[in-house]
Amino acid sequence: MRYAIVYSSKTGNTRLLAEALRETLPREDCLYFGPPCDQALEASVLYVGFWTDKGTCDQDAGDFLKKLVPGQQVFLFGTAGFGGGEAYFSKILTNVRENIGEGVTLTGTYMCQGKMPQAVRRRYEAMEDRPRRQAMLDNFDRALHHPDQGDLDALKQAVHP
């Protein structure tokens, strides 16, 4: 069965996940690897990666997901700078699923935290000094090391349970 790995990656985090998928799946069956592209729609199985923007997938990934047709299978994977845990990731994935039409089978999902640009930290530092500011700075610092090897291994496990 031919597959495609499609990803949108602003900071490189989601690309790291896509590369981990490419390492674990049979190369000879890969029809397409790269950013959203109509060529990838020829695959019957798609692995679609996104970065989180305002609680859902970025627009490029969302627009691509809307092009999937009944009978195709999709596995969603993504990164979010705010690592709010499984409940937070679940909410994002629920929002992302809204881009998938009827008849498209969701085969699985995976999300992890991803590092953010330093400009985000500077924006947090400029905020009024309140507990929320410190929590955001702490989260930024935790995110600096993600996706890490544990995240990549967990993605591979999610694809091959």
Image (spheres, rainbow, N blue to C red):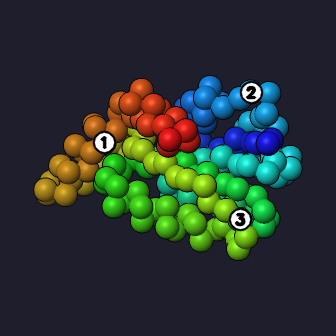
User: In the displayed structure, would residue 85 be above or below residue 102?
Assistant: above
Q: Which residue is mark 3?
A: 104
Of 107 and 151, which appears nearest the observer?
107
- In terms of sequence position, does the residue under pointer 1 or pointer 2 come before the other? 2
| Label 2 neighbour load within 10 Å: few <14, some 14-19, many 20+ | few
Q: Residue at x 52, y 52 (%)?
A: 109
User: In the displayed structure, would residue 91 be above or below residue 43?
Assistant: below
Residue 54 position, x and y percent, is 47, 63
Say what secondary structure mark 2 lies in: helix
Q: Which residue is mark 1?
A: 140
Which residue reaches farthest front?
161
Query: Total label count?
Result: 3
Q: Nearer the viewer, mark 3 or mark 1?
A: 3
Q: Which residue is mark 2?
A: 27
User: In the displayed structure, would residue 63 be above or below residue 109?
Assistant: below
Q: In this rendering, would 5 be left or right of 90?
A: right
- Do the numbered discs 1 and 2 sit on residues whose CB atoms are within 8 Å? no
- Do the numbered discs 3 and 1 sit on residues whose CB atoms are within 8 Å? no
* Amino acid marked by disc 3: Val
Q: In this rendering, would 15 be left or right of 117?
A: right
Say what secondary structure mark 1 lies in: helix
Q: Residue at x 45, y 31 (%)?
A: 153
Residue 86 position, x and y percent, is 34, 55
- In terms of sequence position, does the residue under pointer 3 or pointer 1 come before the other? 3
Q: In this rendering, would 63 be left or right of 116?
A: right
